[in-house]
Image (tube, helix red, strand yellow):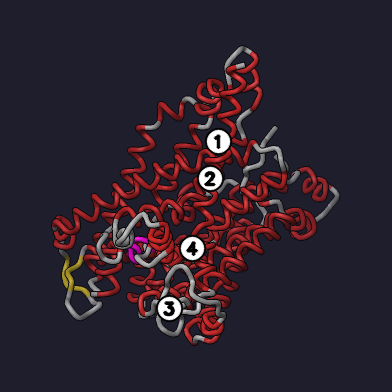
Amino acid sequence: MTPAIRRRPFLSLFVSPAVLVAVAIVAAMAAILRFSLHAYVPGSLDVGGFTLENFADLTRPIVLRAMRDTVLICFETALVTLVLGYPVAYALVRTRSVLLKSVILVTAVTPLFLGEVVRTYAWTVVLGNAGFINATLRQVGLIDRPIQFMFTEFGVIVALVHVTLPVMVIMLAAALAHIDRDYERAAQSLGAGPVRAFLTVTLPLSMPGVVAGFTTAFAWTFSAFATPQVIGGGKVSVVSTLVYQLGLSSFNFPVAASLSLAGLGLALGTMWAVRRAARPLEALGGH
Amino acid sequence: MRGRVSSRLLRVSGRVAVGLILAFIVLPAVVVTIAAFNERAILSFPPTGYSTRWFTRALTYRDFRTGLWNSLVVTAWASTLALAVGTGFAIALKRYAFRFKGSLEGVLLSPLIVPHFTIGLGLLMLATGLSAGQGWPVLVLTHVIVVLPFVIRSVYISLQNIDERLELAAASLGARPRAVLTTITLPLLAPGLVSGWLFAAILSFNEFTASLFVTNQATQTLPVAMYGYVREFADPTLAAVSVIYIAVTAALLTLANMFLGLGKVLNVEQGR
């Protein structure tokens, strides 16, 4: 080590601002914890005495159902996103045409930079009863009455898949881009067809990206609020919409706080379980 | 012979599948664009006539104007602060050993996993506890927290790509640490800093869920104003706003792709 590096110039200048931000994050989480452990005083943002009541409140059927639905919706969304994202990521990494590569990249990535509100609104125009799909089907004469997409779980999942697809494509493409193609060439020169080379070489090597993409899609879906709120229209209740209702519509901070903590635990627990279950799969990608 | 036919079939069906998925990605943008030029006040397909009045309304609607201005202010502050904080931390993270390094990194990167509604709720509660209310400082702080992980990541990746020997050479020729930092390290980092700042700005400009918790009528950002509009009105004004949004974002990304190489920023270039 050189003296210049051992002396660590500007260490406190570099780290102190970051420490301030970290303190704010910790303080925000502590505020949630504090509210979750104190009684709700109706009509006031101040809280009463210490209590565990807010957590007991979470065992109400409506809350339990929302938690179960959240996990199911996140799972289905992550799975569909994975199935749709893989071919796009593969095409993005493997296409030889520079133009095509740019087109796929910009198309696949643009939605990532459009806020949830714009995308959700756009989906209401596509899925609504007088929206694009229903109007088209009616024009063609396939249906007489509109199919209900809005305010259904199906509609919410379609929009959520659209929201998470770009990040899945990016993570899968990053994984595919770092696979050494010589392995595939070796398999093919040993007589494996393209399908077999893909299934036995490329796919297993991309597994770490698949697992990372799946868990990230899960976390994003869990975090989504505008999509379930607007497309679900109150008929689909998930943790995020319930926290909003409790926290900002009825100003019941204590129960909103306990539900956020339970939601955070649920999300981290599920992701941990997925990672654990996927460990044998990930090991396939180890070099 | 059979092998060649089936592999060709595979290639064609693969292309069709990718094309359909890309169509799925583009569909809402196309539909919303058509809806924005529809003259009727309710959303309906097919459009009955051509009109640009929704764009006029979008550009003159008061909540959108103040929302746009608020968003620009918050985005400028938050992305610049996040760049300053994130650059320093990324350098320390890459180069130095110090106490609580791992925990600090964990806390700062946690917004990647912690849902935004939890972050928003926590900061709202914190602000309420400090009697700070839903003012500008809380809003900017929220945005800094949410975009910081992306800045740290972007700067850290560029640090990996610069040759530390250049810094050592400068130091061994007598340059003071400050001179090394300002004449060697930061100029070499410039592309990473630009893309980190751009990333932070785009994400901050689009941030919605956490902002919803920490804004009020006076500080509401554009996405929050748009959300408020969706809940009150059903006319195509929001379609017009969306079209402007989509066009600007796509243009920025195409530019970024031309000048910076989006593939490199996103780490999806084929290695060999």
Instruction: Name above or below for residue B111 compared with residue B215.
Output: above
Q: First in sequence, mark 4 or 3: give its number.
A: 4
Q: Measured from the top left, where is residue B20 in percent x and y?
A: 52, 46
The range drawn in magenta is: A227-231
Q: Secondary structure at mark 3?
A: loop
Does the magenta stretch mainly form a helix, a strand or a loop?
helix
Q: In the visual, does B134 lie left or right of B9? A: left
Report, in whole angstroms, how far the alpha carbon at label 3 lies from the one at label 2: 33 Å
Q: First in sequence, mark 1 or 4: give its number.
A: 1
Read off the residue under disc 2.
A169
Q: In the visual, does A97 lie left or right of B115? A: right
Q: Considering depth in this image, is A237 or B85 the residue closer to the camera?
A: A237
Residue at the location (25% across, 77% down)? A45
A229 part of magenta stretch: yes
Read off the residue under disc 4.
B145
Residue B14, numbered label: 1
Residue B235, numbered label: 3
- Please check whether the numbered discs 4 and 3 fall on a single chain: yes
Q: First in sequence, mark 3 or 1: give its number.
A: 1
